[in-house]
Amino acid sequence: MYWGIHNMVDTPDLYRLNVQEIVSNWGGYLLDVPCSNNQPAINAGIIELRCFINNGCPFSHVSPTEAALVFNERTLERLIPFFPQSFQNTLTTTPGTEGVHFRPRYVFRNNYLYQRDTDGNFEEIDGTGSVLGADQSLYDFEQAWNVEESVFDPGTTAEEGSNECIKSDWRYRDIKITDTEMGIRDVKFDYPPEFYSQWFNSIERDKNGQIVLKKGVKPKFLHNKVQMPEQLNIVDRFGQGVHWRLEKRTPLYRGEDFFIRFYKTAKASTINKVSPEGIPFSNKFPRYKSLDINCEDFTVL
Protein backbone atom coordinates (compact mmCIF):
# COMPACT_ATOMS: atom_id res chain seq x y z
CA MET A 1 0.00 0.00 0.00
CA TYR A 2 1.33 3.42 -0.94
CA TRP A 3 0.23 6.85 0.13
CA GLY A 4 1.16 9.97 -1.87
CA ILE A 5 0.63 13.65 -1.03
CA HIS A 6 1.15 16.25 -3.72
CA ASN A 7 -0.29 19.52 -4.87
CA MET A 8 -0.61 18.56 -8.52
CA VAL A 9 -3.78 17.28 -10.20
CA ASP A 10 -3.80 13.87 -11.91
CA THR A 11 -6.16 12.26 -14.35
CA PRO A 12 -7.98 9.02 -13.38
CA ASP A 13 -5.81 7.12 -15.86
CA LEU A 14 -2.80 7.70 -13.67
CA TYR A 15 -4.33 5.53 -10.96
CA ARG A 16 -3.82 2.50 -13.17
CA LEU A 17 -0.10 3.12 -13.53
CA ASN A 18 2.75 2.01 -11.37
CA VAL A 19 3.43 4.38 -8.49
CA GLN A 20 6.83 5.28 -9.91
CA GLU A 21 5.23 6.13 -13.24
CA ILE A 22 2.86 8.50 -11.47
CA VAL A 23 5.80 10.30 -9.90
CA SER A 24 7.45 10.51 -13.32
CA ASN A 25 4.32 12.11 -14.75
CA TRP A 26 4.53 14.70 -12.02
CA GLY A 27 8.04 15.44 -13.17
CA GLY A 28 9.46 14.07 -9.97
CA TYR A 29 9.11 15.38 -6.44
CA LEU A 30 9.88 19.07 -5.99
CA LEU A 31 12.63 18.97 -3.43
CA ASP A 32 14.48 22.28 -3.80
CA VAL A 33 12.48 25.37 -4.72
CA PRO A 34 13.89 28.60 -3.31
CA CYS A 35 11.39 30.60 -1.36
CA SER A 36 11.09 34.22 -2.58
CA ASN A 37 8.52 36.94 -2.97
CA ASN A 38 7.93 35.88 -6.59
CA GLN A 39 7.36 32.15 -5.93
CA PRO A 40 4.96 30.31 -3.63
CA ALA A 41 6.31 28.27 -0.79
CA ILE A 42 7.00 24.58 -1.46
CA ASN A 43 4.03 23.55 0.75
CA ALA A 44 1.54 25.86 -0.98
CA GLY A 45 -1.32 24.44 -3.05
CA ILE A 46 -4.06 21.81 -2.75
CA ILE A 47 -3.16 18.62 -0.91
CA GLU A 48 -4.37 15.38 -2.42
CA LEU A 49 -4.32 12.04 -0.64
CA ARG A 50 -4.24 8.84 -2.65
CA CYS A 51 -4.25 5.14 -1.70
CA PHE A 52 -2.74 2.44 -3.89
CA ILE A 53 -3.25 -1.24 -3.17
CA ASN A 54 -1.17 -3.48 -5.41
CA ASN A 55 -0.61 -0.53 -7.75
CA GLY A 56 -4.35 -0.03 -8.17
CA CYS A 57 -6.49 2.70 -6.71
CA PRO A 58 -9.48 1.20 -4.82
CA PHE A 59 -11.55 4.30 -5.59
CA SER A 60 -11.23 3.97 -9.37
CA HIS A 61 -13.05 1.60 -11.67
CA VAL A 62 -10.77 -1.34 -12.33
CA SER A 63 -11.28 -4.90 -13.46
CA PRO A 64 -12.33 -7.11 -10.52
CA THR A 65 -9.58 -9.34 -9.22
CA GLU A 66 -9.60 -12.07 -6.63
CA ALA A 67 -6.58 -13.12 -4.60
CA ALA A 68 -6.54 -15.96 -2.10
CA LEU A 69 -3.97 -17.84 -0.07
CA VAL A 70 -4.95 -21.45 0.47
CA PHE A 71 -3.84 -23.07 3.73
CA ASN A 72 -3.59 -26.85 3.72
CA GLU A 73 -1.35 -29.56 5.12
CA ARG A 74 1.55 -28.61 2.83
CA THR A 75 1.24 -24.93 3.74
CA LEU A 76 1.35 -25.74 7.43
CA GLU A 77 4.46 -27.90 7.01
CA ARG A 78 6.29 -24.92 5.53
CA LEU A 79 5.09 -22.45 8.16
CA ILE A 80 5.46 -24.51 11.33
CA PRO A 81 9.27 -24.07 11.61
CA PHE A 82 8.81 -20.30 11.83
CA PHE A 83 6.26 -20.45 14.66
CA PRO A 84 7.26 -20.14 18.33
CA GLN A 85 7.87 -23.48 20.03
CA SER A 86 4.86 -23.00 22.30
CA PHE A 87 2.61 -22.48 19.29
CA GLN A 88 3.76 -25.26 16.98
CA ASN A 89 1.61 -27.99 18.52
CA THR A 90 -1.64 -26.02 18.59
CA LEU A 91 -2.45 -25.94 14.85
CA THR A 92 -3.34 -28.73 12.47
CA THR A 93 -5.15 -29.41 9.20
CA THR A 94 -7.80 -31.85 8.05
CA PRO A 95 -6.60 -33.84 4.99
CA GLY A 96 -8.66 -33.14 1.90
CA THR A 97 -10.02 -29.81 3.14
CA GLU A 98 -8.70 -26.28 3.06
CA GLY A 99 -7.87 -24.28 6.14
CA VAL A 100 -5.88 -24.49 9.35
CA HIS A 101 -7.55 -25.01 12.71
CA PHE A 102 -6.66 -25.66 16.32
CA ARG A 103 -5.57 -29.21 17.08
CA PRO A 104 -8.22 -31.00 19.18
CA ARG A 105 -7.26 -31.89 22.74
CA TYR A 106 -8.63 -35.15 24.12
CA VAL A 107 -9.20 -34.42 27.78
CA PHE A 108 -11.30 -37.15 29.39
CA ARG A 109 -13.57 -36.15 32.27
CA ASN A 110 -15.92 -37.90 34.67
CA ASN A 111 -19.48 -38.75 33.65
CA TYR A 112 -22.56 -38.69 35.88
CA LEU A 113 -25.69 -40.78 35.34
CA TYR A 114 -29.29 -40.11 36.43
CA GLN A 115 -32.36 -42.33 36.25
CA ARG A 116 -35.98 -41.91 37.31
CA ASP A 117 -37.10 -42.95 40.76
CA THR A 118 -40.55 -44.28 41.63
CA ASP A 119 -41.92 -40.73 41.62
CA GLY A 120 -40.62 -40.02 38.14
CA ASN A 121 -37.83 -37.70 39.31
CA PHE A 122 -34.26 -38.10 38.12
CA GLU A 123 -31.80 -39.21 40.79
CA GLU A 124 -28.14 -40.02 40.38
CA ILE A 125 -27.28 -43.70 40.44
CA ASP A 126 -25.28 -45.08 43.35
CA GLY A 127 -21.51 -45.08 43.32
CA THR A 128 -20.54 -41.45 42.78
CA GLY A 129 -17.16 -40.84 44.32
CA SER A 130 -15.82 -44.32 43.70
CA VAL A 131 -13.28 -42.58 41.49
CA LEU A 132 -11.10 -40.13 43.41
CA GLY A 133 -12.29 -36.56 42.95
CA ALA A 134 -15.42 -37.45 40.94
CA ASP A 135 -17.62 -35.99 43.66
CA GLN A 136 -15.60 -32.75 43.76
CA SER A 137 -15.73 -31.59 40.13
CA LEU A 138 -17.32 -28.32 39.08
CA TYR A 139 -18.63 -29.70 35.80
CA ASP A 140 -20.86 -32.53 37.07
CA PHE A 141 -24.03 -30.90 35.71
CA GLU A 142 -22.56 -30.39 32.22
CA GLN A 143 -21.23 -33.98 32.13
CA ALA A 144 -24.48 -35.61 33.30
CA TRP A 145 -26.70 -38.03 31.36
CA ASN A 146 -30.29 -39.21 31.83
CA VAL A 147 -31.22 -42.86 31.33
CA GLU A 148 -34.10 -42.84 28.83
CA GLU A 149 -36.15 -45.42 26.97
CA SER A 150 -34.48 -46.87 23.91
CA VAL A 151 -36.24 -46.58 20.58
CA PHE A 152 -36.60 -50.38 20.76
CA ASP A 153 -38.02 -50.52 24.29
CA PRO A 154 -41.78 -51.29 24.52
CA GLY A 155 -42.57 -47.91 26.00
CA THR A 156 -46.32 -48.26 25.55
CA THR A 157 -46.48 -50.84 28.35
CA ALA A 158 -45.08 -48.51 31.01
CA GLU A 159 -46.67 -45.68 32.92
CA GLU A 160 -45.27 -42.19 32.67
CA GLY A 161 -42.17 -41.83 34.82
CA SER A 162 -41.76 -45.58 35.30
CA ASN A 163 -38.61 -47.63 34.67
CA GLU A 164 -40.64 -50.73 33.77
CA CYS A 165 -39.86 -50.59 30.05
CA ILE A 166 -36.17 -49.73 30.40
CA LYS A 167 -34.11 -52.90 30.16
CA SER A 168 -30.67 -51.39 30.65
CA ASP A 169 -28.96 -51.52 34.03
CA TRP A 170 -26.15 -49.14 34.88
CA ARG A 171 -23.32 -48.71 37.31
CA TYR A 172 -20.13 -46.64 37.57
CA ARG A 173 -16.69 -48.01 36.91
CA ASP A 174 -13.30 -46.38 36.73
CA ILE A 175 -11.22 -46.45 33.56
CA LYS A 176 -7.56 -45.57 33.31
CA ILE A 177 -6.95 -43.39 30.25
CA THR A 178 -3.40 -43.64 28.98
CA ASP A 179 -3.75 -41.02 26.25
CA THR A 180 -5.58 -38.24 28.08
CA GLU A 181 -4.19 -34.76 27.55
CA MET A 182 -5.44 -33.36 30.83
CA GLY A 183 -2.95 -30.90 32.24
CA ILE A 184 -2.54 -28.73 35.29
CA ARG A 185 -4.57 -25.91 33.75
CA ASP A 186 -7.52 -28.26 33.14
CA VAL A 187 -7.55 -29.42 36.76
CA LYS A 188 -7.37 -25.82 37.96
CA PHE A 189 -10.62 -24.93 36.20
CA ASP A 190 -12.38 -28.27 36.82
CA TYR A 191 -12.15 -28.33 40.63
CA PRO A 192 -12.55 -25.95 43.60
CA PRO A 193 -9.44 -23.88 44.50
CA GLU A 194 -8.73 -25.70 47.78
CA PHE A 195 -9.02 -29.14 46.15
CA TYR A 196 -6.80 -28.02 43.27
CA SER A 197 -4.14 -26.66 45.66
CA GLN A 198 -4.00 -29.95 47.57
CA TRP A 199 -3.68 -31.90 44.34
CA PHE A 200 -1.05 -29.52 42.92
CA ASN A 201 1.11 -29.92 46.04
CA SER A 202 0.97 -33.71 45.67
CA ILE A 203 2.36 -33.93 42.13
CA GLU A 204 5.63 -33.42 40.30
CA ARG A 205 7.07 -33.88 36.81
CA ASP A 206 9.11 -36.92 35.88
CA LYS A 207 12.10 -36.83 33.53
CA ASN A 208 9.74 -37.04 30.54
CA GLY A 209 7.69 -34.09 31.74
CA GLN A 210 4.71 -36.24 32.72
CA ILE A 211 2.59 -35.53 35.80
CA VAL A 212 3.26 -38.10 38.56
CA LEU A 213 2.48 -38.33 42.25
CA LYS A 214 5.17 -37.52 44.77
CA LYS A 215 6.44 -40.53 46.65
CA GLY A 216 4.62 -41.29 49.88
CA VAL A 217 1.73 -38.91 49.12
CA LYS A 218 -1.87 -40.13 49.29
CA PRO A 219 -3.59 -39.01 46.08
CA LYS A 220 -6.57 -36.68 46.16
CA PHE A 221 -7.26 -37.13 42.49
CA LEU A 222 -5.82 -39.08 39.55
CA HIS A 223 -5.88 -37.07 36.35
CA ASN A 224 -5.76 -40.19 34.16
CA LYS A 225 -8.68 -42.03 35.80
CA VAL A 226 -12.29 -41.14 35.03
CA GLN A 227 -15.72 -42.24 36.17
CA MET A 228 -17.62 -43.92 33.33
CA PRO A 229 -21.13 -45.42 33.13
CA GLU A 230 -21.24 -49.14 32.31
CA GLN A 231 -24.32 -50.99 31.05
CA LEU A 232 -24.55 -54.44 32.67
CA ASN A 233 -27.54 -56.23 31.10
CA ILE A 234 -26.72 -58.41 28.11
CA VAL A 235 -30.06 -59.95 27.06
CA ASP A 236 -33.64 -59.59 28.24
CA ARG A 237 -35.88 -62.44 29.38
CA PHE A 238 -36.87 -63.13 25.76
CA GLY A 239 -33.27 -63.63 24.66
CA GLN A 240 -33.08 -60.38 22.74
CA GLY A 241 -30.25 -57.89 23.06
CA VAL A 242 -30.58 -54.91 25.36
CA HIS A 243 -30.69 -51.54 23.67
CA TRP A 244 -30.09 -48.37 25.64
CA ARG A 245 -30.29 -44.61 25.25
CA LEU A 246 -28.72 -41.82 27.27
CA GLU A 247 -29.65 -38.18 26.83
CA LYS A 248 -27.34 -35.37 27.82
CA ARG A 249 -28.90 -33.27 30.60
CA THR A 250 -27.52 -30.00 29.25
CA PRO A 251 -27.53 -29.39 25.49
CA LEU A 252 -24.36 -28.68 23.58
CA TYR A 253 -23.96 -25.06 22.57
CA ARG A 254 -23.80 -24.43 18.86
CA GLY A 255 -20.36 -25.22 17.50
CA GLU A 256 -19.19 -27.04 20.64
CA ASP A 257 -16.69 -29.80 19.97
CA PHE A 258 -17.08 -33.09 21.79
CA PHE A 259 -15.93 -36.70 21.55
CA ILE A 260 -17.18 -39.98 22.99
CA ARG A 261 -15.16 -43.15 23.39
CA PHE A 262 -16.87 -46.53 23.82
CA TYR A 263 -15.26 -49.51 25.52
CA LYS A 264 -16.36 -53.03 24.64
CA THR A 265 -16.55 -55.16 27.77
CA ALA A 266 -18.33 -58.28 26.43
CA LYS A 267 -15.91 -61.03 25.44
CA ALA A 268 -18.41 -62.80 23.16
CA SER A 269 -21.90 -62.31 21.76
CA THR A 270 -24.70 -63.86 23.84
CA ILE A 271 -27.59 -62.92 21.55
CA ASN A 272 -29.24 -66.09 20.24
CA LYS A 273 -32.38 -64.61 18.73
CA VAL A 274 -32.28 -62.39 15.66
CA SER A 275 -35.39 -61.01 13.98
CA PRO A 276 -35.09 -61.07 10.16
CA GLU A 277 -37.64 -58.27 9.89
CA GLY A 278 -35.76 -56.09 12.31
CA ILE A 279 -37.06 -54.65 15.55
CA PRO A 280 -39.87 -52.12 15.14
CA PHE A 281 -39.20 -48.59 16.31
CA SER A 282 -41.36 -47.22 19.09
CA ASN A 283 -43.95 -44.68 17.89
CA LYS A 284 -42.89 -42.43 20.75
CA PHE A 285 -39.80 -41.35 18.80
CA PRO A 286 -40.90 -40.04 15.39
CA ARG A 287 -37.60 -38.17 14.96
CA TYR A 288 -35.83 -41.52 14.61
CA LYS A 289 -38.13 -42.81 11.86
CA SER A 290 -35.59 -41.92 9.20
CA LEU A 291 -33.36 -44.68 10.63
CA ASP A 292 -36.08 -47.35 10.47
CA ILE A 293 -35.57 -49.57 7.42
CA ASN A 294 -39.20 -50.73 7.68
CA CYS A 295 -40.64 -47.21 7.63
CA GLU A 296 -42.59 -46.46 4.43
CA ASP A 297 -43.78 -43.00 5.44
CA PHE A 298 -42.18 -39.67 4.64
CA THR A 299 -40.11 -38.30 7.47
CA VAL A 300 -38.96 -34.77 8.14
CA LEU A 301 -35.25 -34.45 8.96
Image: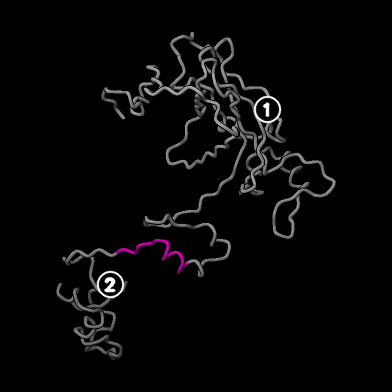
Check the image and report above or below for 218 versus 97. above
Disc 2 on helix, strand or loop?
loop
**Image coordinates for residue 74, horizontal then vertical, percent:** 42, 65
Q: Quadrant of residue 193?
A: top right
Q: CA distance from mark 2 to mark 1?
A: 64 Å
Indicate whether residue 216 is drawn in magenta.
no
Q: Amino acid type of disc 2?
A: Asn
Crowding around mark 1 (Cα neighbors within 10 Å: few <14, some 14 to 19, many 20+) is some
Foreground disc of the pair 2, 1: 1
Q: Which residue is drawn at the image coordinates 35% and 21% (left, top)? A: 286
Q: Left or right: 148 with respect to 199?
A: left
Q: Amino acid type of disc 1?
A: Thr
Magenta stretch in the rendered image: 68-79
Front in this rendered view, residue 229 or 7? 229
Q: Quadrant of residue 93?
A: bottom left
Q: Which residue is mark 1?
A: 128
Check the image and report above or below for 69 versus 171. below
Q: Left or right: 203 with respect to 169?
A: right
